[in-house]
Image (cartoon, rainbow, N blue to C red):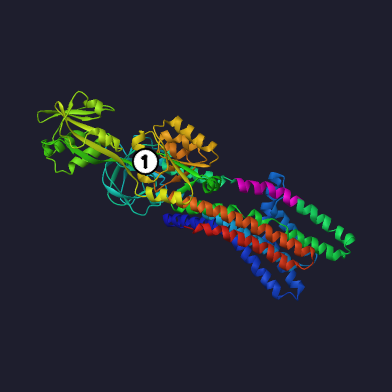
Amino acid sequence: MNENAAVYQTTNQKEQNRFLHQWRQNGELIAAGISGILILIGWFLNDHSMWSIPLFILAFVIGGFAKAKEGIEETIASKTLNVELLMIFAAIGSAIIGYWAEGAILIFIFSLSGALETYTSNKSKKDLTALMSIAPDEATLLKEDGTTVQIAVASLTPGDRIMVKAGERIAADGVILSGRTSVDESALTGESVPQEKSQGDEVFAGTVNLNGSLTVEVTKHNEETLFHKIIKLVKSAQESVSPSQAFIERFEGAYVKGVLITVAILMVVPHFALGWSMSETFYRAMVFMVVASPCALVASIMPAALSLISNGARNGMLVKGSVFLEKLGTSTMIAFDKTGTITSGKPAVEKVSIAKGQDEASFYQALYQIERQSNHPLAKAISEMAKDHQVAQTVDVTIEETSGFGVKAQLNGDMWRIGKKDFTREASIHPEIETDGEDLSAQGYTVVYVQKNEQVVGCLGLKDQIRPEAKNMIRELNELGIQTVMLTGDQQKTAEVIAKEAGIQTVVAECLPDQKVHEVNRLKKQGDSIIMVGDGINDAPALATADVGVAMGGGTDVALETADLILMKNNLNNLTKMIRLSRKMNRIIKQNIIFSLTVICLLICANFLQVLDLPFGVIGHEGSTILVILNGLRLLRAS
């Protein structure tokens, strides 16, 4: 009985918390709706002022409370007047001269536009912080004696082993020690297709183990996981303010002061200078206070920026703040690292040249048996290629590896050497090799020589594979008028071949990390706003130097932390999409600013010509604010 009561109490508490959360999320919109209903009832009872006026006053209080509180708190904190207080003053002024309904409508529409702004902000936070609710709090720790125990995720340290059952979320970043499964990584990358994982593959906290039990070795502390890096990005994005928005916020305080001073003048001067009656003078001053308020101007930027941040997060593009979105849309040059960015970072054998008379079966057998024991990327590519030639059953071979040069081993009575030209320099080149290493090198291939005893009997040409989407992405960038540059540490010839194949216009090869920074600074001095895209530790300084640094989601931790924008899916097409959307955002912001200023000017002129009544002033001013916000919200669904 006590257990049932406890369960009931817990469930009831959860329901209350859920209700409070929903109220915080939608409170402003609900208050605006109630205010609107009260205004509508008061409008029908307009002939009975004893009923209608209290309803309008109630609409004032309910609809205007949130904005009045916000305005007062901001004024106290910053010691600067703001647009919220200006609108409250205008509504009170309307009521003073007997326009209760108009004042209430002003509050209603103003609160509605504020609710739309809040919705945009909440939507952005919801899309960006969806991960926060899915990270597991506990993990199943596998102890040395084989037993398991539940511990807090925060207690995990690198080297710990954890068990992950089918259907559970992985508690930490790590490497699979045993087991095979499919992992749903959509929460991190946005990729809907589950990824096949087996022994040796990396897994991330917050992703879902769909089938099969796993044993995972933890590789990072809880606060260093990819999940927590994304949370840091979230906070950075939510707190950032773009240069345009910062200018508007600085401008707002001075503008509000100017409006209030002008209102004070208009309440006196026209009566004496133009012969207006005192009631007409005061009325026109109140209309001016309404139509001159910069509500639409203030709302021109932030909803659009937050909408794009939300859109990007939903599609696997995380940005650290709206300041970088503006720069992304104005950049005229983009520099790429090669390996892991333009290319996949996984070389493949494209050319095989074997000397005439050499037994191909023994040739491929030697390649596979020797290279499969090395962890070098080139060795893995060679062993995978050789395996496709139906090599014999695996045999144990003792290899001797010289780091950076090659590997040698004794196999079936023959001494084999596989590696760079210098590694085989004492051997003669077989006279009947179809294509020698020099020809392959001239074509941009990385060349590996194969020596059998005292003679080189074969050459392999390997090339890093260009990402499938890279060519299309470069073509789109060229169409957008953005100059493309490759900054790479590779040899000039190899870099030129890759750049030509991808369509990149300029190549700077053999760059060390400090040289990449020098090149980025040199390009910036040409007057160009530059984007840098990379994935490695050696790219981090250049990413920090560029106007906008973009990191591939599969890149190193240093690159991810340094970059301003992260492509979580490693899909370069998302970069061109983000640039297009950033340009669209900049266009929308310009449209909003021009539109809002035009409406303000027209309404002010109409008021001085005495052809604008307060109700139309309210509708014109607040209607323009809502239109501006809705224009920015288009970026939530833009593609």
- Alpha-carbon neighbours of circle 1 within 10 Å: few (<14), some, or many (≥20)? many
Residue type indicated by callout 1? Gly
Q: Which residues are magenta?
A: 243-257
- Expressed as whole percent of the image width and height from the top left, the position of residue 361 reads 12, 39
Residue 248 forms part of the magenta stretch: yes
Q: Where does the image place residue 440, in percent across and percent down from the top left?
A: 26, 36
The reply, left or right, for residue 129 in relation to residue 299 is left
The image shows residue 480, relative to residue 341, as above or below, that is below
**Relative vertical location of residue 193 with respect to residue 340 in this rendering, above or below:** below
Residue under label 1:
340
What's the magenta bit mostly, secondary-structure-wise? helix
Say which quarter of the image contains residue 55: bottom right
Q: State the residue at coordinates (73%, 58%).
A: 292
Q: Decide if residue 91 is in sight here.
A: no
- Tag count in the figure? 1
Comparing 270 with 37, the one in front is 270
Res 407 quadrant in image = top left
Location of residue 165 in the rendering, given as x and y in whole percent from the top left corner: 31, 48
Label 1 residue SS: helix
Q: Report the side of 356 relative to 516 (left or right).
A: left
The residue shown at (62%, 48%) is 245
Image coords of residue 494 (percent x, y): 33, 37
